[in-house]
Every structure is written in C-alpha cells, then in structure tokens.
Image (tube, coloured by chain):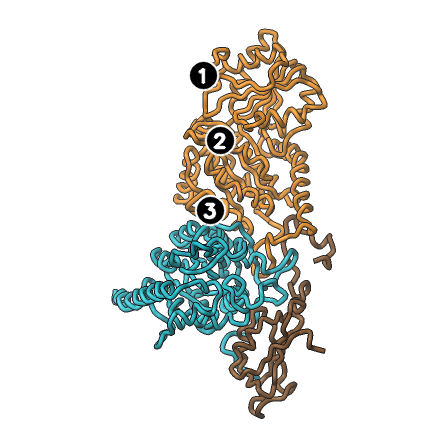
Amino acid sequence: MRRTTIPEEEYMLPGHSACLGCGGALAMRYLLKGLGKNTIISIPACCWAVIPGVYPSRCLEVPLLYTAFEVTGAAISGIADAMEVLGKDVNVVGFAGDGGTVDIGLQALSGMLERRHNAIYVLYDNEAYMNTGIQRSGATPYGAWTTTTPVGKRRMFKREHKKDIMEIVVAHEIPYAATLNIAYPEDFIKKVKKAKEIKGPKFLHIYAPCPTGWRYPPNKTVEVARLATETLMFPLYEVEEGVYTITKKIKEPKPVKEYLKTQGRFRYLSDEDVQIIQKWVNHRWKKLLLKEKYSRELLEE
Amino acid sequence: MSKVPLEEMIKFPTPIATVPSKELNKTGSWRTFRPVIDYTKCIRCYICWKFCPEPAIYFVDGDKHEAPSDAIKKMDAVEIDYDYCKGCGICANECPRNAIDMVLEEKIE
Amino acid sequence: MMLLTGNETAAYAAKVCRAKVVAAYPITPQTTVVEKIAELIANGEMDAKYIRVESEHSAMAACIAAENSGVRTFTATSAHGLTLMHELLIWASGARLPIVMSVINRAMAPPWSVWTDQQDSMAQRDTGWMQVYAESNQEVMDSIIMAYKVGEREDILLPTMVMEDAFILSHTSEPVDVPTEEEVASYLPDLKLPYKLDPDFPAGFGSLIMPEGPYMEFRYKIAEAMDKARKVIREECEEFEKKFGRHYDGLVEFYRTDDADVNLIMLGTMASTAKEVVDELRSEGKKVGLLRIRYFRPFPYEEIREVAMNSSYIGVCDRSYTFGYGGPIWSEVRSAAYPAKVFVKNYVVGLGGRDITPKVLRKIYEDALTMKEDKEIEWVGLLWDERWR
C-alpha cells in the first residue's frame, strides 16, 4: 500500500548519462509523467541529446527525434501537422534547452507560436549552453560566471539580465504559457496535464538547475531550485489567454543572497552586485503582481 | 555499446536507437558515495523516490524492512537500485527525517 | 495538356504526387511555386497542409520532421534559401528521408541577382541529395514524379532536388502533359517508410555515435544507396516510359554524340540552345555532339566515360564555378573521363543569368573544334573579352 503525490508510472529509464543531480533529468521525468505514453518528443542539440546515451541506447519509453540546434519550433510544427494529416491524436512536444530556445532557436519558436501549431514547446532552462561546456546564453542571469563570461581581472561576469522569454512568448497571445520548477513536482505535473488538454500552441518554462555549470554539489539541486522560487528569482505562474495567475504565492520572500550564496558561479559578486540583482528581482515581481491584477479584467470580456 | 552485435547496430539505414539504457549502462559504477536508508527512521513519505533523477529508487513490500511504527510498516518501503544510483545525494538532502546517509563507497564491504 | 510555367508545373507535380505536407518560404523566383500550391489547397484541389514557415531553414526542418512521421513532403527554394538550408540538407540525407524539393537555380549574392546560374545547387553536391537538372517544364513534372518513386524505395531512401533555370523555365509557359492523381497513384503508391515516429515505437532517431561506433558504416550505406540509384534510375526511366509514354535516356541525354569528334557536356536549358547549334554545325559537316547531364547526383560517370572514349575532344560548360579550381561539372567530368585520356576543356559561361545565345555556343564549339590544349579553363563572354562577341 502506498500513496504518492505524483503519478507513479515511469517513462524514463535509468542508465542514462545525465550528470549526478541533473535538473534536466528531473524535468524530463516529470514532463513524461504528466504527458503519458502517447507522446512524440523532438530534441535539438543540448544536454538531452546526449543524456539518452551513445547509440543504440535509448532511455525514454516514447519516440525521440534528434534534430539540429535551432529547429525545435519548426520540427514540432512539422510533426504536429503530419499527425493531423494521419488523423492521429498524439502529444507533440519540443524539449529544448535555453540556448536552443532564447538564442539560436528563437526564430523557429516564434514561427511555431505565431502559426498556432498544436504542440507543446518545453524549455528546460539551466541558464547557459551547458552541453558545450557552460558558455553564456541569453538566459544566463546577471552576475553569473560562465566560460565565456569568466570574470577575470576585468570582472567580466554576465552583465545583461536574463532574457524574459515568458514575456516574448506571451506576446504571441497563445492559449497557455507557464513556469515550472523541478522543486515543485506536483505543481509541475498539474501544469503539464493542463497544457496537454489545450489545443493550440503551449509553452512551458522549466527551471532546471545544473550542478556542473552552476558550481554547487549535486545533492543540492532540488534545494537550489526551491530557493529560486522562494527568493522570487523564478516565480511560478501561468498565463492563460493573457490572464496571469501566480500559482505559488510566497508570503515572505527570502533575500536573493540566500539563493546566490549556494552557487559558485555567483561567488565573485560584491554586495553592490547583489543589490542590483535584488532590485531586478523586486522589479520583475512587482510587474508580475501588477499583471496578475490587471489581466483579470480580460476575464470580464 | 560493444555488447550489441554489429548487424543489430546497422539494421536500420540510419541510426535509430532501440536498446534500453538499463541494458547497456549500469551507472551505479559512477558512485563515490552510496545512499544508505536507515529504516528505523524512514517514515515512507516517498520524497526520495519523487526527487531521484535517474530514477533509481523503487517500491518494495512494506514487510521487507523495519519501520518506526506498525502503521508505517503497512506502507510500501523503498529501496535504492544500486545498479543505477549515481550517488548524487538528492534523496539524502531532501529526506525530512535524515534517514539516508551518504557513505563512501570504498567503505562498503 | 496544360500551358504551365516551370513553377506552376512544380506545384502541379506536388499535387499529383499527393504530397501531404508542404513547408516552404518564398524567394524570387520560386515564389509562384508556393503561391500556386497555396491556391490549389485553398480551392480544395490539393489535400495537403502548407506550413508557411518563417525561413528556408525551418522549411527543411519541418519537412524532415514531417517526413520522419511517415508523411510525404515537398518544398521549393532558390539561391540563398537553398544555401540557408545547407546544414539540414545533409541532415535529410543522413536521416534517409526521401523529401523532394524543387530548386529554381538562381545566382548567389553579392552582387544581388535573381537570374539563373547553378552556383546554388552545385554548392550542395556533397549533401547526399540526388540532383536532376531539367531542360523543359515537362521534364520538371516527370522528374519530380520519378524522384518520389526512386527516392522512396526501401533500398534507396534518399532525397532529391529537381532543378529548373530561373525565368527561362520557372516563368516561361510551355505545354505540359499533367497526369491525373489516379494515374500517378497507380505508378507511385503511398509513402511507406520502414520506420517512423510513432508512440508505439519508442526509439531515438539520429542519436550519438562515437568514433569506434558505426558512424562510417552509416555513411557507407548512403554511398551504397547513391551508387545503386544509377541502375534504379535507368530502369525507372523505362518503367516511366511504359506508364506515361515519355522517354528519358536515363541519367543523361545523348544528342548526336555517337560519331562526334567534339562533344560538349552541359546541363539545364542551355542544352536546348546547344542542340540547335549542333544541328547547324552538323549541316556544315562538323562532327559535333552534346551530352546533357540530367542527373548530376548520382554522377553518371559511366555514360561520360563512354562518350569520352569515343571523342577526340570534350568541352564542359559550367554555369557555376568552384573558386580555387574550375567549374564543378568540368572537374568531375575530367576525373570520370580520365581513362579515355582525352583533353577536357572548361567553358565557364552565363553566370548571373548572362544570356547564353546560339552565337556564344557556336563560338564555344568552334573553339573546341580547334582542339587546342593550351588552356584548360576559359571564362566565356567576360565584358572585356572581345573574342566571344
């Protein structure tokens, strides 16, 4: 006898090559628990192109199409339309990293959303080009060390704030977009199931910490992810037809320093830098609260 | 990888991977630290199972292990699959009862 | 019989071949291909999904994904659109997907030019795609139908690009015999891939291989399929003739090559003009001939070697160039003709759509008839060069 808070069925096999404590591995595990077996996944160049292992190894119980780096949005457009031609009702999913989504993959994502294809675009965000060795991406947060922002004497850590991909996606006016966090699997899977039932383009932004790239010991992955939401670095919310709903209200947000001090990639930051980050977090949270408040008026239409 | 005969590997005209990773890669060999569950403390909340990235934790009959109480013993217990557990330690870190110890692999046996 | 431009022909070919997913991006002078397809779909004459992708790169990506799902796809492009797809062209052949693409041969920038030359498709000759160059709109129709038939065979499984010259074919109307969908269906059955994306088949399509793994072996399989395609194409041309009544010599077209001392080798519409020049010179007693390459990939080295063995001199006209060496057709013909030990001269002509007139072709033949071996590569008709006027 047992009771679990998330579905038991596993669609991912162990024996895969993810690093110890990989947030991306948890992301895929929960995603498939929410979607089930009737799924086809397209994966570009990213950690997940390597995680299933060397040929002929596979670690998923659903078909996986490996593709070139920048094409996820276009590939799932092709699969979604092919399924319609064949009269098949299948979950069509693109599963891409932050590089393949906010940078090189942005065009194809925008095209897929704009054309309203019936597919789910899933971004698992580890905040850098991790598969190629921790180079910075548009999703790398302010202050982070990466191999292309290696701090050095000129303190050249990443100076640009994290690209707000959710806002770019929401600007396409799609039926559903949401942020998900591997530290909150129940909320995660609930949102996946919701997206599954909607027809049209859906976008899921998963926070997937990376011990190797963020410089923290692998046992802390879930803890770090939790702190991201508790400090408001990564708020959990969904946007349905333009209406914002924060799904995890943090009554007493922790200061961002609690989050930053867990990771080696932030150890070069001065108090001043931390303040810049705190200001940015506060500003985005305030915007989010306002959006939640005012977008409710859309419900009255 | 070398376990699979060549004809199997090239039976398709393009590489289509069909062999389950479980059969090819026993990632338990990656471990430096091994999680060991203290069943006298384990309340069978299944949080460890929930957060395992492999996943390498599975359910077994409740009677197989001791439990802190009779009520808890009625619930299924969990076991670590040491063939695949990489020893990341997330289970130990998240366990609300500190019932899992990360022990240096060399010290076992 | 319909009066159709080359572009309209390509669109009708996609329709009668029952392509089910078309993903394409507009580029001059391909635009009317996709506009016609959109029109046919909108009028209910063609039952297909048209993905109005946001770039050519996405067009090929969508075709690859849709074809991998077991659905026949079609696309069309030109010049910069084709070169933008380059990465994915290699992907499509590596994934063994029999996509068919109409390519309107157009010059590359800079400088901008929308007129015809073959730089765009010649630059793709390494990608593992079969390549057919049409001389007429009818050939465009027939080549697309045959491209699906040959490509979709389980022992071939390779994509094909069917080329037509910009404006000369794409925007010029010619009478085209358009078979009905039923006629084509009895010749070309529905697509049946041996493997496809399906939840009942949980496999990884296109995963990672280490050096000691069978990477080279998979590449060898592509080479094998390409080589096999030569015989298949020759046989298929015969099958096609039985079914549709139109004859093609196979990978090439022989025009009065048998007893010719001098043979020119070329492809595309310039061959039409050249045939008239051959007839004219023949009437003057000059023994000249023309070998038109239809399939550039797989390369018809056997036919070329045969013609070379029976020639005293070969000229190769290239409407493109491999900077640092010579015209691509020339270098490949020369290597195929090597055992014949005959001199092979390169005539680079018509780049950027510069008109290839009967006069220019006649001058090329006359130059070849001198059989001089002092110069291997000749750029024909450069504005400062009076010899070709």
- C219 with respect to C164 (left or right): right
Query: How many neighbours does mark 1 have within 10 angstroms: few (below 14), some (14-19), or many (20 or more)?
Result: few
Q: Position of residue A25 (x, y in %)?
A: 54, 65
Which secondary structure, mark 2? Answer: strand
First in residue order: circle 2 vs circle 3: 3
Q: What is the drawing colour of chain C?
A: orange
Q: Find disc 2 in the rendering and name its residue.
A: C105
Q: What is the drawing colour of chain A?
A: cyan
Question: Could you say which is closer to the camera, residue C164 or residue A243?
Answer: A243
First in residue order: circle 2 vs circle 1: 2
Q: Chain of mark 2?
A: C
Disc 2 marks which amino acid? Answer: Asn
| Vertical comparison of C316 with A280: above or below | above
Distance from the alpha carbon under mark 1 to that under mark 3:
40 Å
Disc 1 marks which amino acid? Answer: Leu
Q: Residue furthest top?
A: C284
Q: Are marks 2 and 1 in contact (CB under 8 Å)?
A: no
Q: Quadrant of the N terminus of chain B?
A: bottom right
Q: Quadrant of the C terminus of chain B?
A: bottom right
Query: How many neighbours does mark 2 have within 10 angstroms: few (below 14), some (14-19), or many (20 or more)?
Result: many
Query: Is residue A278 at least partly visible in the picture?
Result: yes
Query: How many neighbours does mark 3 have within 10 angstroms: few (below 14), some (14-19), or many (20 or more)?
Result: many
Distance from the alpha carbon under mark 2 to that under mark 1:
23 Å
Q: Quadrant of residue A64?
A: bottom right
Q: Nearer the viewer, mark 2 or mark 1?
A: 1
Which labelled disc corresponds to residue C58?
Answer: 3
Q: Give the residue displayed 45% in from the left and 30% down from the top.
A: C170
Q: Find disc 1 in the rendering and name its residue.
A: C383
Q: Position of residue A100 (x, y in %)?
A: 47, 54
Q: What is the drawing colour of chain B?
A: brown
Q: Position of residue C349 (x, y in %)?
A: 51, 21
